[in-house]
Image (spheres, coloured by chain):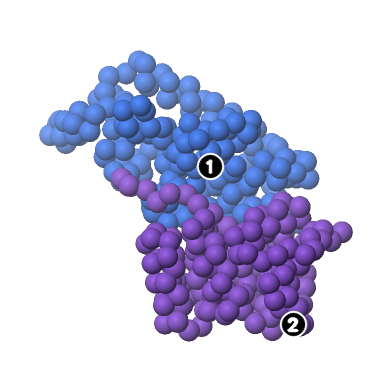
Chain colours: A blue, B purple
Amino acid sequence: MFNVLLAHIQEKVNLSVGDVDLLKSFFIPKKLRKRQYILQEGDVCKYLMFVEKGLLRMYHVDDKGAEHMIQFAWEGWWMADTYSFLSGDISQYNIDAIEDAELLMITLPNFEAMLLQLPVMERYFRILFQNNIISKERRLINTISYSAEEKYKRLVATHPEMIQRIPQNLIASYLGLTPETLSRIRKKLMQS
Amino acid sequence: MKSIGYNNSVAIIGANSNVGAQFAMAIAKAYRLLLIDSDEIQTSLLATKIKHITQLPSAVEVLSCSKDASWEADIIVLASPTFTHASIAKKIAEVTTCKTILQISNVNDELVSLQNILPHSHVIKVIINHSSVMVQGENADALQLALQLLSFAHWTLIEENKLT
């Protein structure tokens, strides 16, 4: 149940056997069915979630009812509306499962207690947040600087598993393209 | 893609017992239910009855494994005979960390404490005496959650006790 999380942490920091036992006591194990919400717009994001198995998406619904994909998370990824989670303010996002999922969830009080009692996790999350900032900067540059075709090519290069697992219309939304545009790009790339 | 609305899911283990069925009927409109009992035919009948009452076809499901149900649920209600509680607790311990567990018993039943078996769960004892109920537990948030659930069941709270 904790295999993926422990492997992910131990890639970055060392945990003792005692640390592992203590770490497990902070997390809520949760199974989520395909298409089941874990966060809905207007609610507070109460959990920081780690995906042990399955696939989640976070998205925003605009005034016209169109969904805009913000993030996907599969095995080994963390997911939350960080602002809502840390501030306690309501979220403007939805998070649901694209595939049946097994999550490990932690509340803010438990998150803070864990960082106090396991200082090694401070280092782990510092590394994660650094990586997250870099990744957000890259996504911003992709959005404002590249053509539709280039955006797709870069996504294929950096996250090939996304192309395999995630429906094409959701990938189009993630890239800020229409499904028709993405379809044309894919066709063109296959022909070339 | 149409999604299922998020609601707290409650697993009721021992759903066919008098108290389990009563509790399930009482909270069904507010929570998504996962019903578990050894007689699955009887449990399915209960689920059908609840779906008819609530008019929410997706809000109740019958599962066969208490561990899977507890893994999926946010709150677990033990409504089976009290002599089964310890063995169920051992089975579900791994998937109930930080979750609230309501251990329901009648006033005359011998009640074993599950907190030692479930050290990282928030166990709340709910002791029923006719239509009155006593609630005991260590975690304030879990106690609050238990009272919220019990408020649907028309039992009169005669004692709320935060064990220290």
Q: Quadrant of the N terminus of chain B?
A: top left
| B134 horizontally vs B25: left or right | right
Seen at 50% across and 52% down, the residue is B7
Percent from the top left, x then y, of residue B24? 53, 68
Q: Residue A78 shows which numbered tag? A: 1
Q: Quick check: A45 above or below B144?
A: above
Give the amino acid at mark 2: Asp
Report which residue position mark 2 lands on.
B109
Seen at 79% across and 63% down, the residue is B159
Cα separation between marks 1 and 2: 44 Å
Given residues A21 and B3, the one toward you in this image is B3
Q: Quadrant of residue B78?
A: bottom right
Q: Quick check: A184 above or below A137?
A: below
Q: Quadrant of the C terminus of chain B?
A: bottom right
Percent from the top left, x then y, of residue A91? 52, 33
Q: Quadrant of residue A29?
A: bottom right
Percent from the top left, x then y, of residue A68? 36, 31
